[in-house]
Image (cartoon, helix red, strand yellow):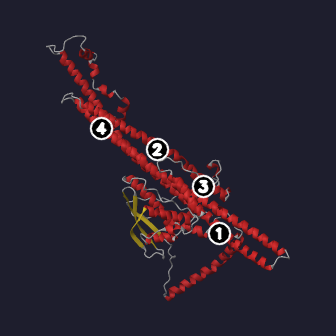
Amino acid sequence: MNNPSDNIESIDPFKDPSVEHTSPWNSQFENTNQDVISAPENSTLGLQQPEMQEEGICNSITQEGNTSNNQQTVVENIERVKSGSSYDTKEPHKKKLQFTLKTITCKNNQTCIYRFDVSTNFPEYKRRKYFGIERTHAEFNKLSKHLAISYPLCLALSFPCVENFIINDPDIETAVHTFVQTWLDWVSFHNILQNDYELRKFVEAPFIFNPSAVITSISKSKFEIEYEKFSKSSFSFFQGWSGNSKKASAVSIKSDDITDSYNRSSLTPDEKFQLYGKEFNTVSRPLNNARIRLIALQTKTRQAACAILDLSSQITSLGNIDLGKQSKLASSLLSLGQSEKSISSTQTLISAVEGTQPRFYLSNLEKGGLDIQRSLVNRVIIFSEYYEAKQSHDRKKQAVNILRSSSTIASKAVDDTLKSMEEAKNVETELRNKAEQVDRTLNIDIKKYKAVRHGLLTQVLRSWATSQLSLERQILEEYKVCLKMVQQSSADSLNHIRKTRFSVEGNTNNSIPADPNNPLNSYISSYSASHFSPKLSSSITPGISSIFSS
């Protein structure tokens, strides 16, 4: 079915952090969440629906009765107006839960504290608005893990990695704010996650929230094992940049091109989710190579900054040589050394940007890809449990048929087997509903996350390009100043040599003997007057001069 809520390309999950946050996801999440509960799509279910004919009959009966019901409603409304009684024509309010991130504070670049406001109309909450709630990064991580393990039917995103980065730059702070607010919006607008009891405790009960206490069983569930597996694979990304991200081996993906499989109408549900996994793998695969290239780029930029700083010290030392207090060459060299020092400082800033912003973006984008793979693995686990329960039910059903056909089996054994078969049937029905729900929910969640990922990638490129362009322009301005100094210094030095030559030629005392072996005379005589033109400095570096001529 084509639902207007499935049009997710118009989602823009980003707002200016300085503006009061009003998430554009409200209507989108609410509409799609209603679809999850009340509108199962046959094209997205991994199971067949044998009850569709009966449902169609019920729908036709309902449509036939709509006319009489509408007429009756109109008559009742007219009678209410005549009698003066009040009635509410508005629809009941939809449940809303909204988090608005205000500030992020990091103490000693280790512990991050997030302050946010909450507004809700959930009847379970004690108040409608909460202001200035503060929670640490560790508490958010605990909540994220609890949601991921407790709700394997849906896509529960991991909380962004922040504590490994120094938040002392406005661009990094904006990026962190965007990622954290995106996570808060994802949880608060999700039809399943927003109703979590521990989420309400997280808001209402400060310093008491401890989701680890909810898990009392000693043995870990399959979903918790998968969560820890994918968490460990993502840790290697931002711990020294030395590890390789692991791929989800539980989801089988064909090797054909993605573009050949975009005709989703002809695909089975399993093939569709395999295609989802392949798409996110295709996006996440270059991240490992990108971080390696960024390490090399950052290293070269740092080396360039050190080399330019060394050049600056050498030029400054050359300018400090005793060439006379009135020497223009000495002052030009000192100014040039100062400019080279500024260029070195800017190169250091570029190195810092290359080591922080892209690293933060890539690490959190990879975590999103791993969340998708983990959800697909959870789907495989849920369907495996369903198929096992179905086989168990079939075996017990066959056992009942065999017992019934035998005349030597006691009736008590038949009753026990019937009871066991009913229990197996109930388990199969429960797991069947769970399998149907995971297909519907994941299909919608992955579509929404693809829109979110597109917005994040757009902001990544915009922010990084803006920072790089600003610093590169600063370096170009410094080089422009250096070029003018070189041109001026070369012109001044040539003019000085020309004056020295004229003074030597006009000196009647012949203080410098006209000895052909004199090195000064041979040096001066090697230049002609045409060589001393100031235009010579402009022809030294014609390519660079043409860049700044405008």
Q: Which residue is mark 3?
A: 276
Viewed as shown, does residue 402 lie left or right of 439?
A: right
**Disc 2 vs disc 1: Cβ atoms closer than 8 Å?**
no
Image x and y of residue 258, in percent: 62, 49
Would you place residue 381 above or below residue 527 in this image?
below
- Identify residue type, mark 3: Tyr
The secondary element bearing badge 1 is classed as helix
What type is the residue that disc 2 sits on? Leu
How many neighbours does mark 4 have within 10 angstroms: few (below 14), some (14-19), or many (20 or more)? Answer: many
In space, the residues marked 3 and 2 are separated at their CA atoms by 28 Å
Secondary element at image label 2: helix
Q: Position of residue 437 (x, y in %)?
A: 62, 66
Quick one: label 4 or label 2, which is nearer the N terminus? 2
Q: Please name the residue that numbered disc 2 is placed on.
A: 294
* Residue at the extreme left of the image, as rendered: 509
In this figure, which residue is indicated by the disc labeled 1?
Answer: 433
Residue neighbourhood size for the residue with mark 1, other residues' Cα within 10 Å, grouped as few (<14), some (14–19), many (≥20)? few
Q: Position of residue 302 (x, y in %)?
A: 39, 40
* Location of residue 488 by image quarter: top left
Quote the CA–CA distance across marks 4 and 2.
27 Å
The label shown at residue 339 is: 4
Q: Residues within 10 Å of mark 2 (few under 14, many from 20)?
A: some
In the image, what residue type sits under mark 4?
Answer: Ser
Give the foreground label among 3 and 2. Answer: 2
The answer to whether residue 364 is above or below residue 119 is: above
Could you tell me which quadrant the C terminus lies in? top left
The numbered mark at residue 448 is: none
Q: Are marks 4 and 1 in contact (CB under 8 Å)?
A: no
N-terminal of the two: label 1 or label 3?
Answer: 3
Residue 550 visible within the image: no
State which mark lies toward you, 4 or 2: 2
Instruction: Out of 490 and 534, give the one closest to the viewer.
Output: 490
